Amino acid sequence: MVAFNNTDDVIRIANLVLGRASSSVLVVDNSTNRDDARALADACDRMAEVVYVRPGVNIGFGAAVNFGVARCQGGPDDILWILNPDTDFDLRVVDSLISLVDASGFGVISPRIVTGKANTDWFAGAKHDARRGIIVDQRRRPQSDDVEVVQTEFMCGAAPLMTLATWHRVGGFRDDFFMYWEDAEWSQRAADAGIRMGVSLSHTIWHRVGGASESHGGKSGLYYFYMMRNRIKLHTELSGIRGTFSLPFIATSIRWLLRCARANRFDTAKLMALARGVVAGYIWALADRVCKSKLRVELDDEFDSPVLILWADSRSPNLGVRVLARGTAELIGGVLPKAKVEAQDFSGGALGVNLGPRTLAKDILSGGRLLRRRLRKYELIIDTGAGDSFTDIYGLRRPFIMWYVHRVCVAMGKPVILSPQTIGPFGSPVSRIIARNRISTSDLVIARESVSYHVAAGLSSRTAKVVGTDVVFSLPMPLPLARTEVHDVLLNVSGLLVNGDNHVDGAAHIQVLETIVSGLKARGRRVELFAHVLDSGKSDNDVSAIEKVQRSSTLLGDCEKVIPADLEEARGHIASSKLVVGARMHACLNSLSVGVPAIGMAYSRKFHPLFTSLEWPCLVDARLAPALVAESALDYVDRIANGEFDFRLSAARERGCDGLSSAQASVARLSEVRHRSANDQR
């Protein structure tokens, strides 16, 4: 269920569903009211079979459903029921619908949905009229009681029921729709995949329509804005931009306008919301057509312009930073194969200077000539945001440095792309102003998951945006290691957590590692301690952390250690293992990218949305009590060993590769436009 400031409804439905044996409930809370969110979290904590997750911002209905399904622990044959909390039904309906999925030949089943005091039909099957841009009720319904399920071309998102395998076969809802029309787009993909959708007319649930988008005066401005914006966006994709200017489509739009005016007594605010939706729909459709097309484009084979990757270093002791440099270079190389790609980090690189406060001060004193002279030769700037530094949770120093360099690039007329990265959160007004400026002055923004996408969209609507994924999925598969014995379990020991920081207590984390190793050895597993940040002068490297935990614990001291020489060797070790347990996010992502299951121990917000976008559920919160962290990790160990997540593993890698393909196509389209523009100027 997706919650939105409706705690009472969610708890009522949760109690109802839990009355059925072998059922569990997952709640994704999009609430904007903090008191409501806190009350819902407390209530869910008291219910044993309810899992409560909160993205942190309102990411919309479709993205929230995807967020929740990624946390589902079931296998491919388990049943998924996506249910609006503002419904009511007899519990016996659930068992009957499940039996229909097994026996009716329909891959997706919905009950008949009624509303109002008179139980008027709200959904009993429908079809999508793309010509007019509306959903039309099915008028022909069987009169015979023998026909229990009727086929439908459109599946309403209020109560669809299916197996997890069917959900993964179709893919989740589109994150970028926020709310409304995402079910129409999903239905189209389900039909294209050959999945039959049906409505059981003999099983009924009641639905309070518009629970999340009603105001005291009827439909809210949000309803009219998103309904119209997404309608234009979807039908541009289905019928082309000309289709939305056809007479039937325009006639329907006018009827919607008149209906809005009559229903709201010519409420200016709601009419303006509808008008903004029309404008936003066409702007978004045109921008997406250029920047999110998945068609391959032809670029000049001789295009050899220099490209600068900011905030990455292919020689960094942190292999996650090397992933940023190598992965981004692969991303750009797939579009511009002859481009000369160079990298610059905070501490040095292609520009020949450290990008720190002193350099910025010197640049200001030189009238901006210092950086301009070094940046002049580059025709494209790729801003990685250091992967996860486009936020103020680590302070304002890094965001300010990145903004300053970004400002110089934009002032020089350089095209700037924000490559796949985590965006936000932003707690202070200053950081939000800086972030808004960086996003609005970029040529393209690629978020690596939907939460970051919506943070960026909330800051600026001017720049084209796309959801990609981490650049680790652009790296080639590693070569096999020159050894006959493969690793069993690689346990990544993070110096960041072992030495303690503002996220996790160091002593508590060592206790977690001991408990996990003890549990693994009790299961007959062979454990090796793995470093993903190599030895350096900094105290948070993983090599010194491994030495520290081995000195402090006999159990950990008995484990062999694996210290790779570079990124390629690290990926080779990972590919030769059966399981990776890691607190470094890129240790886990490297693992998933080579097809090896990983259990992540999250210490910050960046983990959860990215794992969710890959629909890989094996993630524990390292900030919880040590016993609970270890217990959760070992539970995932057992379930992975039993093959419960086998079907998700290959799917996660495919989603990662698909996300990078979309990002690469967006860069390709932008590069093509820029290249043609440069030729025209010549």
Image (spheres, rainbow, N blue to C red):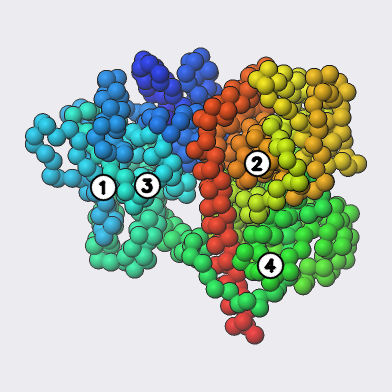
Q: Tag 3: Cα neighbours inside 10 Å, few (<14), some, or many (≥20)?
A: many
- Please identify the residue farthest to the right as the structure is shown: 537
Q: Residue drawn at (28%, 62%), measured in percent from left and top?
A: 250
Q: Secondary structure at mark 4?
A: strand
Is 562 in front, or is 661?
562
Q: Amino acid at mark 2?
A: Ser
Which circle's residue, 1 or 4, is located before the other in the chain?
Answer: 1
Residue pointed to by mark 3 = 186
Q: Amino acid at mark 3?
A: Trp
502 on left or right of 607: right
Is 499 in front, or is 273?
499
Q: Residue drawn at (83%, 59%), measured in percent from left and top?
A: 349
Q: Position of residue 562 (x, y in %)?
A: 80, 36
Q: Is residue 608 visible?
A: yes
Q: Given this view, does label 4 or label 3 mark the residue nearer the observer? A: 3
Residue pointed to by mark 2 = 591
- Report how far apart the C-alphas of labels 2 and 3 lie in the structure: 30 Å
Is 178 in front, or is 363?
178
Q: Amino acid at mark 1?
A: Glu
Q: Secondary structure at mark 3?
A: helix
Report which quarter residue 661 is drawn in: bottom right
411 on left or right of 191: right
Marks 1 & 2, CB-CB < 8 Å contact: no
Which circle's residue, 4 or 2, is located before the other in the chain?
Answer: 4
Q: Residue drawn at (87%, 29%), measured in percent from left and top?
A: 547
